[in-house]
Amino acid sequence: MEKAPLEDFVGRHERLFVLTGAGCSTNSGIPDYRDSHGNWKRTQPVNFQAFMSEEHTRRRYWARSLIGWRRFGQARPNDAHRALARLEASGRCEMLLTQNVDRLHQSAGHRQVIDLHGRLDLVRCMGCGQKTPRSEFQETLGHANAEWLALDAADAPDGDADLEHADFSSFKVPACEACGGILKPDVVFFGENVPRDVVATAQDHLTQADAMLIVGSSLMVYSGFRFVQAAAHRQIPIAAVNLGRTRADDLFTLKVEERCEAALAFLL
């Protein structure tokens, strides 16, 4: 029987550089940011400068996160994560670079993963750098804001929740216990730069790859798109699995418009 184009593409390459985005995790119950045209489905995520300079922005962020984390923290890998872990186990994955902050690739057993935008399961002090598990900080937040725990709201991307008309002025945001500094999830916010060493490590792995596979990303954010540009510059083949338009449609050797877990089912 003739192989499907994506199965054939994967079978012909020994060292795939895989880049994943939000579409990889939607089947785990985590909403994505963009529609099939690559446009925002909702207001843009919190901005780094606003978070660091405005008490109101921090209250709003952590109040919504207090509600959203309850489900986000329980999310489990789906067949797309498991398929990519199987690809690595077969020795055909040079590196997996993910734009997601949910750590679901690691939960599925993937070993070689670069978290391009950080990880939501840690909270970092912007003063002294101390890191705390997000689950531990959830308890601290809940103790300080017990009356908020009765609220529920629809899930938004990355552990956020749609508390649209709440008054956040009474919400208490704990400071770092070690230095009194501002606490922020250990992820890259909009307006914040991806650490240089993370970019450099990913680029090093891309130079070792013989092809690139994009799974579930519209590539609208430059931090991910630049790796596709680099692959195109090296003239290695690029395949993509994504529902709808991406920023790099003109650079692909192959594009599969299917749900990630369905397109990758042959790996399982």
Image (cartoon, rainbow, N blue to C red):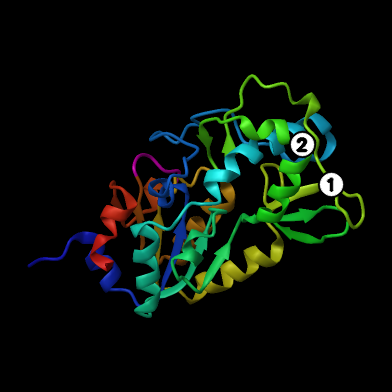
User: Residue 110, image x and y in percent?
Assistant: 46, 70
The part of the chain drawn in magenta is 243-247
Q: Is residue 1 left or right of residue 85?
A: left
Quadrant of the snapshot with the C terminus: bottom left
Label 2 sits on what residue type? Arg
Q: Residues within 10 Å of mark 1 (few under 14, many from 20)?
A: many
- What residue is disc 2 on? 58
Q: Residue furthest right?
A: 179
- Residue situated in front as seen by the camera: 225 or 72: 72
- Residue situated in front as seen by the camera: 203 or 100: 100
Q: Is residue 158 visible?
A: no
Quadrant of the snapshot with the N terminus: bottom left
Q: Main secondary structure of the magenta part?
A: loop
SS category of the residue bearing label 1: loop
21 vs 154: above or below: below
158 vs 5: above or below: above
Total labels drawn: 2
* Marks 2 and 1, how far apart at CA: 9 Å
